[in-house]
Amino acid sequence: MKRLFKLSAALSCAILIGCDGSSQTQGLDNKGINMVVEPGVSASLAKDRAQRIAELSYDLSFSVPSDPALPLNGRIVISFDLSSIENPLQIDFAQSADSITTVTAEGKLIAHSFENEHILIPSSALRMGRNQLTLDFLAPQDAVNRNPDYLFTLFVPDRARRAFPLFDQPDLKARYRLTLETPADWTALGNGSRQSIATKNGRQVFRFANTDPLPSYLFSFVAGKFETVTRSMGGRDITMLHRETDTEKLDRNIDAIFEIHSDSLEWLEDYTAIDYPFEKFAFALIPDFPYGGMEHVGAIQYRASSLLLEDAPSESQLLNRAQLIAHETAHMWFGNLVTMRWFDDVWTKEVFANFMADKIVNPQFPETDHELNFLVSHYPQAYGVDRTEGANPIRQRLDNLNLAGQMYGPIIYHKAPIMMRQLELLLGEKAFQEGLQTYLSRYSYANATWPALIDILDAKTQIDLASWSEVWVNSAGMPVFSLSISSGGAGDTGKTVLRQIDPTGAGREWSQQFSLLSLSDATETSMLAAAEATLPEKGDGESLQNLLFNADGLGYGRFPVDTALLNAWDSLTPLQRGVLLVSGFEELLSDSEESAAAYFDTLTRIVLAESNDLLIELAAKQLHYVYFSLLNTQERSERIPRTESDLWLTMQAQETPSKTKMFFELFTDIALSTEALEHVHNVWSGKEAIPSLHLQEAERIRLAEIIAVRLPDRAEEVISKQRQETTNPDRLRRLDFLAPALSNDPEIRNSFFESLKTPENRATEVWVSDALRRLHDPTRLDHSAAYVLPSLELLEEIQVTGDIFFPSAWLNRSLGPHSAPKLASTVREFLENRPDYNPQLRMKILQAADPLFRASQRRTKAL
């Protein structure tokens, strides 16, 4: 039923919007002009407001109660120029009508109505030119991610309207002035510089200066019991908030965290030719933050564990931290200074942040093979979506911002940088950089589209970039390459040709550059491939066992490969080994006749003998999937003792703490036998010491979770002891949340899963994802199979209540570990029975179910 609200008795029933129960209604203002009001922020509403509204600013105040069960009291003053008053003005507020307590214009109460997540201001209360509206409201604690001792806001892509009334769209940039009243022992961080702190009635009042123009999704604040560290780096002050209680962990990491931020800022200023474009730079490390990071202007938020690494981190962990910091810092230019006009181009800010991050970290890690790092960071995840039935294009259509969260995923984070590297190859690095500098300068503090950038770059090349972009950016999927013999003329036997096949049959061509390696004489030759390309002389007529396509890791698609090439492992460079692993895995997944057992045995040899950390981790990820999903029961049983024993011995033989920890984590991940799990338990309990392995609190908690699940008779004892030994309050709250999912009692686990059907119990989404991982542990799949259908049935609600990455995380944890044909049928039937199901969510299901579909297909064929 529609909810109506009125402040003034002068507002008659004839003015109010009707109550027909539809999700889209015709509102009637006091001039009698019809107006569509629908939930969310539609593209048409956003376009209308962008044409009418200018010079927008918000003066916003929040009072945070000490009791986390109570709502926040808020007041917002919205000032703007209006070019038309023909229609009422829709202000976004995704709460109930009674959450608005007063609305005034120029100090006078005004009549208004509330409909479908919008406050409607009648034309009679507006005027041409400058307007000022003041709204008093209540915001629930979940709208600002309230925890017992702190809170943080996360408004991307359209969540600001859950916390306060505003025009929640990216192309209405505004200046924000924030006042925040909090409990007395809290501190606070906002986008603007802190102007003052005062004590009032035993509470703290923080006032922040006006910000530069920001889109609504970048407005943010953090408040709570945090420690503050400020350092002067590169001529600017940088501030960090954190809640870490382990001083040794903090001391180990803090210098690197500040240095990487400072180096990233300096690099970006040089590359873009634009000084840091905002007045301050600060960041907060938040326990169990839903994402790795979020680029709020002047107040970046990170998941604490992503930056505060445990002792003896691996090379990839150090690289990931550096790339994450560089990514969020790059957003200050790409996304924050220049913002997409609409969230169909959200990928542009993400691809540039990722693309720049890869460039930034190179000089910081001179010993790293950065081409290999690019390959292992991006290709497996991009292929992981593009090979599925739910593949989506980089740029997707978006009709309403309430679906914008589904724009995010591996394609924009991992395929888009691959595409961008090909684009840079077409243009050349200098022309590409000059084009980006023009783009940033032309659209500073404003909004732009991908076609606008293509127009800038198109002037720098003879290539038709619009057509090139149509295939790479606007369409889904990837090419499949195949070898054939061309038709020779009289007396000509023909040449070997590499042809692109469009799996959809649409005849698309992904023009791209890559190289071909001939193992016969170790010759690597560059190729430019569109529809087809004749192999160079060195490769013509060669057996596929001697040819490695895409040897330089620049190309994109499923390349022909003979997994017998893995026998030539030692003769390849690290990058070529990575390419072979990626291509070999794609071949394994595409061909159900390929022996999973043979591939597993080869992976095991690689993991045990390889010295490159990046390659070990890439092979280990493949090994995990093949071990638990593709091997049949007999094949896995035959390999359990040897695999566990080899990993245990290899771990003990490592000479560095980081390598020891890497192999120990892999060992604990695949441990299934009682003997192996006893080793894990003894290391956790301290009965067994491993030289150079020093476990921190979070790592010990991870071991306790594994032991509780795989040695179920000890679950209660292990979790009880781990609770007593956990000193960090945030980690203790997480462990208490997970405890029912770790229980040996199936009924307790069932009750816990049932509890997840209540949105409040999914509030800390990282915890929910971790709990689902334990519920769907490979040793529990027979029991957790019952959760699959209910998990699918909850998805639409989860999309509405959860943050942008949570629907995918929910699906990946719930579907990914399974391989039973019956469950594959369950997913198929779920979608078949819902022909009108949300297309974005349908794609997410098909993406997450791809490992299940492929594993179940093998099992079906084996029967």
Image: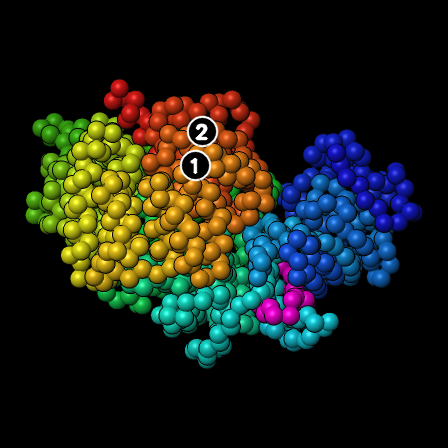
Q: Nearest the camera: 803 or 836?
A: 803
Q: Tell me if label 2 and label 1 are in contact, CB under 8 Å.
A: no
Q: What stretch of residues is rendered in magenta? A: 167-189
Count of numbered labels shown in the rendering: 2
Mark 1 surroundings within 10 Å by alpha-carbon count, few (fewer than 14), some (14 through 19), many (20 or more): some
Q: Which mark is residue 329?
A: none
- Could you tell which of marks 2 and 1 lies nearer the N-terminus? 1
Q: Nearest the camera: 642 or 806?
A: 642
- Dot 2 lies on which element? helix
Instruction: Say which residue appears at 28% left-offset and 66% top-offset.
Output: 365
Residue 175 falls inside the magenta stretch = yes
Q: Nearest the camera: 561 or 796?
A: 796
- Percent position of residue 654, x then y: 18, 58
Residue occupying the far left of the picture: 521
Mark 2 surroundings within 10 Å by alpha-carbon count, few (fewer than 14), some (14 through 19), many (20 or more): few
- Percent position of residue 661, x then y: 26, 57
- Percent position of residue 303, x then y: 46, 58
Residue occupying the far top of the picture: 863
Q: Which mark is residue 786?
A: 2
Please state which amino acid type lies under the numbered disc 1.
Asp
Instruction: Say which residue appears at 26% left-offset and 46% top-offset.
Output: 678
Marks 2 and 1 sit apart, C-alpha to C-alpha, by: 15 Å
Does residue 687 appear in this view? Answer: yes
- Percent position of residue 103, x then y: 81, 55
Residue 427 shown left or right of residue 647 in the figure: right
